């Protein structure tokens, strides 16, 4: 089975089951919602805060198997050339957005930095860029100016307390087996008054509710958690941070999410075919050639409606992906 083509099916059950304590609210009751091909555990939804997760949670070895080397692509390149160029362009803009208001030379940590596409632009802007990543294969081709630690989790990186002025967790928290522990460690290593930026898919969004099991951003089984916005903010605050602004629009992710989710609804047994075909090399032999026309049609006819839906969702505070800007409170006088 290729990386992105595991069918997800609604369970349709109405019973409430007992599960381990929720990472957000500690509740021990949840309702099963989705079954993922090849994964024994269902995705359940907490009856109190709405957090989705696998229960029981897959073990570390099973989670590691969800990320073969091809998940990260070739060194320095994951997508076909035109898409890769767009990713790099957006990353440079993204770095400027993330760093707005930081002092020159500020220390910025990207948790789960992957290929490090943001670390190079941060270095270009004069910031001290750091990254933490699980996979050594992922960081091949990353900017050499960035200091990247390959560790099993953030705690294992052993940073000193109050080491950073800003920490970014960009579409990574949902991949982690223990998101609360990661946020608690962020609190320890962030300067008092420092910023935390957390981005996740929004499980309470229009897109998630309308697409259901076909929602592109479910990304099962890699997304171990599905965060509704209220639960995300609750977890961040539980770890000691003060939540500030929430942003609901992402040009890079939200419009494509509408297009791919719609395509998944038409072909649930072969999900994420558009996304798969955009990879370089393609994740399935011959996929790129066979799907070129279909991709073009979906993108040409779907882009404007998807963009309009994404803007409307953002205006109504229901973006398919969200990011929260929080801060560690200043040290008491």
Image (spheres, helix red, strand yellow):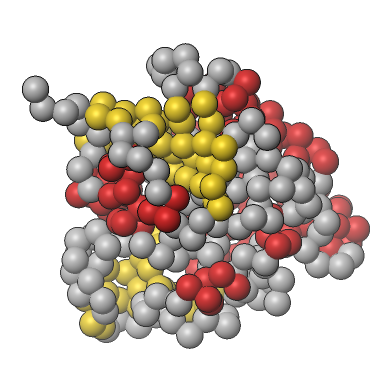
Q: Residue at x 41, y 18 (%)?
A: 102
Quadrant of residue 168 in the image? top left
Judging depth in this view, the residue of 244 and 59 nearest the camera is 59
The quarter of the image holding the N terminus is bottom right
State whether residue 104 appears in this view: yes
User: Looking at the picture, how far across and down is residue 60, in whole percent?
Assistant: 48, 73
User: Looking at the picture, how far across and down is residue 92, in whole percent?
Assistant: 62, 26
Q: Residue at x 52, y 22 (%)?
A: 127
Q: Residue furthest left?
A: 333
Q: Is residue 144 above or below residue 260?
A: above
User: Looking at the picture, how far across and down is residue 98, in whole percent?
Assistant: 47, 27
Q: How many marks?
A: 0
Judging depth in this view, the residue of 309 and 295 nearest the camera is 295
Left or right: residue 97 versus residue 73 is: left
The quarter of the image holding the C terminus is top left
Judging depth in this view, the residue of 69 and 150 nearest the camera is 150
Q: Residue at x 49, y 40 (%)?
A: 110
State whether residue 16 appears in this view: no
Q: Is residue 17 above or below residue 321?
A: below
Quadrant of residue 56 in the image? bottom left
Quadrant of residue 64 in the image? bottom right
User: Looking at the picture, how far across and down is residue 99, in whole percent?
Assistant: 47, 23
Q: Residue at x 41, y 36 (%)?
A: 167
Left or right: residue 14 versus residue 156 is: left
Left or right: residue 64 versus residue 77 is: left
Left or right: residue 301 versus residue 239 is: right
């Amino acid at each position: 089975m290729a990386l992105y083509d595991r069918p997800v099916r609604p369970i349709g059950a109405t019973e409430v089951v007992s599960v381990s304590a929720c990472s957000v609210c500690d509740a021990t009751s949840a309702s099963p919602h989705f079954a993922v091909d090849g994964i024994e555990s269902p995705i359940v939804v907490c009856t109190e805060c709405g957090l989705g997760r696998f229960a029981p949670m897959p073990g570390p070895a099973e989670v590691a198997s969800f990320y073969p080397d091809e998940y990260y692509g070739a060194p320095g390149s994951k997508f076909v050339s035109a898409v890769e160029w767009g990713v790099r362009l957006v990353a440079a803009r993204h770095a400027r957005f993330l760093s707005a208001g930081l002092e020159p030379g500020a220390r910025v940590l990207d948790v789960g930095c992957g290929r490090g596409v943001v670390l190079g632009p941060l270095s270009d802007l004069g910031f001290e860029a750091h990254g933490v990543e699980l996979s050594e294969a992922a960081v091949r081709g990353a900017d050499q100016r960035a200091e990247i630690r390959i560790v099993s989790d953030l705690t294992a990186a052993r940073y000193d307390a109050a080491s950073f002025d800003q920490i970014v967790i960009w579409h990574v928290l949902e991949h982690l087996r223990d998101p609360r522990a990661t946020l608690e460690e962020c609190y320890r290593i962030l300067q008092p008054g420092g910023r935390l930026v957390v981005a996740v898919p929004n499980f309470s969004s229009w897109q998630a509710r309308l697409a259901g099991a076909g929602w592109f951003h479910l990304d099962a089984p890699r997304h171990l958690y599905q965060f509704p916005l209220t639960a995300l903010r609750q977890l961040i605050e539980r770890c000691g941070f003060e939540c500030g602004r929430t942003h609901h629009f992402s040009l890079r992710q939200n419009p494509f999410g509408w297009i791919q989710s719609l395509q998944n609804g038409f072909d649930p047994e072969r999900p994420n075919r558009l996304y798969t075909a955009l990879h370089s090399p393609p994740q399935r032999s011959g996929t790129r050639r066979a799907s070129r026309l279909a991709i073009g049609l979906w993108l040409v006819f779907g882009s404007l409606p998807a963009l309009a839906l994404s803007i409307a969702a953002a205006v109504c505070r229901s973006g398919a992906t969200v990011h929260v800007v929080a801060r560690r409170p200043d040290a008491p006088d």
